[in-house]
Image: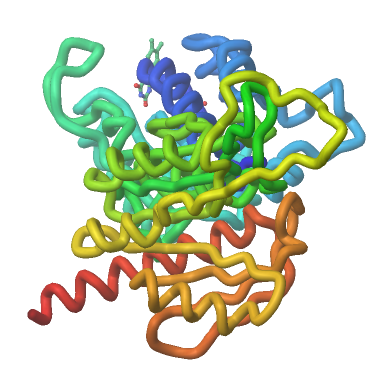
Amino acid sequence: MSSGKKILLGVTGSIAAYKALDLASRLCKKGHRVTAVMTRSACQLVGPASFESLTGNPAALELFPRQKPQQIEHISLAQWADLVLVAPATANFLGKAANGIADDLLTTVAMAATAPILIAPAMNVNMWQAQAVQENLKKLKAFGWKIIEPESGRLACGDTGKGRLAPLEAIEKAIEEALYPNQQLVGIPVLITAGRTEEDIDPVRTITNRSSGRMGYALAVEAAARGARVTLITGPADLTLPDVEKVVKVRTAEQMSQAVKKHLPLNKALIMTAAVADFRPSKASAQKIKRGSGSLDLKLEPVADILAQASRNNKKHALMVGFALESKDLLANARKKLIAKNLDLIVANDSQTIASGNIRATLLEPKGRAVKLPLMGKPELAGVLLDKLDELFKKRKANQNAR
Ligand SMILES: Cc1cc2nc3c(=O)[nH]c(=O)nc-3n(C[C@H](O)[C@H](O)[C@H](O)COP(=O)(O)O)c2cc1C
């Protein structure tokens, strides 16, 4: 269910090639799909099998592969990629790319790609300072390629100076900026709740609902892919847990409430997608309730309103995003909830959404008109909502600066 991007990771014959393994692994953990394209020299320094096991995709090595003669490998790879990243990039690669030479798979893919291209060079300090390398870098920048500058320090060859591959964090940041040019979620802590809750009737029976958790999980994956530091508080959901900074598993509304109270003070936004029970049995039976001849009366009591409480106590430092699922008077009820709970944004959706992969949503803010969105997949809506969240962060910052 990843809504991450497709990243073509070019690896060339630099001593820093082993660092590309860690990079590939980090990118996959963020939900991106990674295919390594390795030069022959790179294969002398690290093995394609390592990239294959970390990314789950075959590493591409040959311009004329024997296995897939029916496919033109360099064109299909170039079309597949949302982003081409060459890390580490050798002086040789820079020279070939800057001068229109396409004599192996990587240089040919780079020339055929229409996606943004990022280059993280790594080499000896004297090579870095060589006039040819500097001229080639100028040319590549003029092509619109982004260069992630190497850092200074002690180099593998023993020399000291500029030429060491940029820190992986800097490369990851450049990737996020290239993939999401208008996004600024990088490093922002965001709390997302997802799934349903279960309220006990007796030791084996519960009151619950049909929420799948898909919306919240899609948001968690997408927010993490955009660089946010995501804490996901999840009730039961029949999905694989996304790989985000922190996952807190809960079952009941009370546990979810406690978890939100604990984690929200450390976060800058709460996105409350969880379908929390509104009522629970006033008293859960300690023993399994036996079938009798008559009917069973269950007395239900309301549970605490997690979002309203969270908003009251954290509104100053965190943005509040809620979901309203209504079976009638959708927009009027959603607007009421938006105002009553003092939210920054509410996502109104009808009851067909629950347990479905798709959602038809309307976005409402305290000021402004309702924005009706077409039917779309939940990962796609996650992207739209996070664009909106970014806009809200920017507005809040501008307001704070104006004061
Ligand atoms: C052990 C070793 C380490 C190397 N490290 C680098 C390096 O960090 N940067 C670089 O530009 N070239 C480095 N080279 C030289 C390149 O591997 C060489 O220029 C090669 O032709 C590059 O091919 P490629 O660009 O197709 O990968 C290294 C060579 C060896 C033998």
Name the outermost residue toward the left.
403
Using the rendered view, name the quadrant where residue 151 is placed: top left
Q: Quadrant of residue 164?
A: top left
Relative side of 132 to 88, left or right: left
Residue 83 visible in image: no
Residue 397 visible from this viewpoint:
yes
Check the image and name the residue furthest to the right: 70
At 37% from the left edge and 16% from the top edge, which residue is drawn?
Answer: 15
- Residue at screen point 58% across, 51% down: 275
Q: Is residue 82 above or below residue 243?
A: below
Q: Position of residue 324 (x, y in %)?
A: 56, 67
Task: Give x and y (percent) for residue 240.
Answer: 63, 30
Taking the image as shown, residue 237 lies to the left or right of residue 176, namely right
Q: How many marks?
A: 0
- Residue 224 occupies quadrant: top left
Residue at 61%, 57% (x, y): give it: 114
Q: Where ligand 1 lies, by image quadrant?
A: top left
Residue at the limit of the structure toward the front, as seen here: 294
Quadrant location, the C terminus: bottom left
Reply above or below: 274 against 370.
above
Q: Position of residue 248 (x, y in %)?
A: 43, 31
Applied colour scheme:
rainbow
Image quadrant for the N terminus?
Answer: top right
Q: Is residue 73 left or right of residue 150?
A: right
The residue located at (30%, 35%) in the rendering is 169
Nearer to us in this view, 253 or 86: 253
Relative to 6, does residue 248 appear above or below in the rendering? Answer: above
**x then y, percent, for residue 343:** 37, 70
